[in-house]
Image: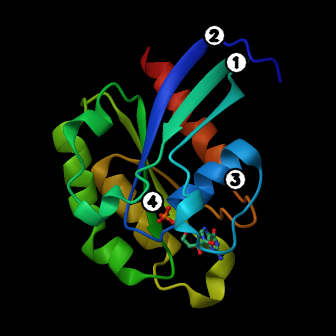
Amino acid sequence: MSCTYAYRFKFVTIGDAGVGKSCLLLQFTDKRFREVEDLTTGVEYGACVVAVDGKNTKLQIWDTAGQEAFRCITRSYYRGNAACLLVYDITRRETFFNHLASWLEDATQHASARMTIILIGNKCDLSHRRVVSYQEGEQFAKEHGLLFMEASAKTAHNVEKAFILAARTVHKKI
Ligand code: GDP
């Protein structure tokens, strides 16, 4: 795809360590999956030009890359961002039931109220190990006014769709 673009949006990823934030980013930008956990290749930034409603749009995505250990991410991380991908792992209850609300609070406290937030239930290829139902994810999103999708960074299911849905929502706000 041509690298000229009409719009440029900044995105950030948040959520517990190990939920697959770096892998989602890598799958979206490079169309590949990193099987083995290797912190040295943790992605911190990726960019991709996609067509959103017929307009080439550059998405610049920053990954927390380890900062989630501190949970409270600094205000500067959120500054100027159009969208936030809030990620949990459908096979780990604590990433949804215990920690999601505090991630959301962090984002809504530090970011602009205009920021689009999409909730992503990742690792949906592991449905045999699922402990968070689709309906629970959907309900949380509804209650907090978030977009929602389940995805898999491994199979690429819904990965591009999730980024494009978020970008389309950002487009509509400008
Ligand atoms: P992060 O700490 O949130 O950035 O998580 P990573 O992207 O480093 O992923 C953590 C682990 O989960 C790695 O071992 C990945 O290979 C694995 N992983 C990430 N996404 C998926 C997925 O969609 N399906 C499966 N089966 N494993 C995944």
Quadrant placement of the C terminus: top left
Sequence order check, earlier mark of 2 and 1: 2
Question: SS for tag 4?
Answer: strand
Question: SS for tag 3?
Answer: helix
Q: Which residue is mark 3?
A: 27
Q: Position of residue 132 (x, y in %)?
A: 46, 79
Name the mark on residue 56.
Answer: 1
Sequence order check, earlier mark of 1 and 3: 3
Question: SS for tag 1?
Answer: strand
- Three-letter amino acid code of the residue under disc 2: Ala
Residue sitting nearer the eye, 142 or 55: 55
Hey, which quadrant is residue 143 in on the image? Answer: bottom left
- Three-letter amino acid code of the residue under disc 1: Asn
Q: Is residue 52 left or right of residue 89?
A: right
Name the mark on residue 32.
Answer: none
Q: Which residue is mark 4?
A: 87
Sequence order check, earlier mark of 1 and 4: 1
* Residue 134, visible in the rendered structure: yes
Q: Is residue 90 left or right of residue 95?
A: right
* Residue 150, visible in the rendered structure: no
Pointer 1 and pointer 4: residues touching (CB < 8 Å)?
Answer: no
In the depicted structure, whether residue 71 falls above or below residue 91: above
CA neighbours of label 2 inside 10 A, class few (<14), some (14 to 19), many (20+) = few
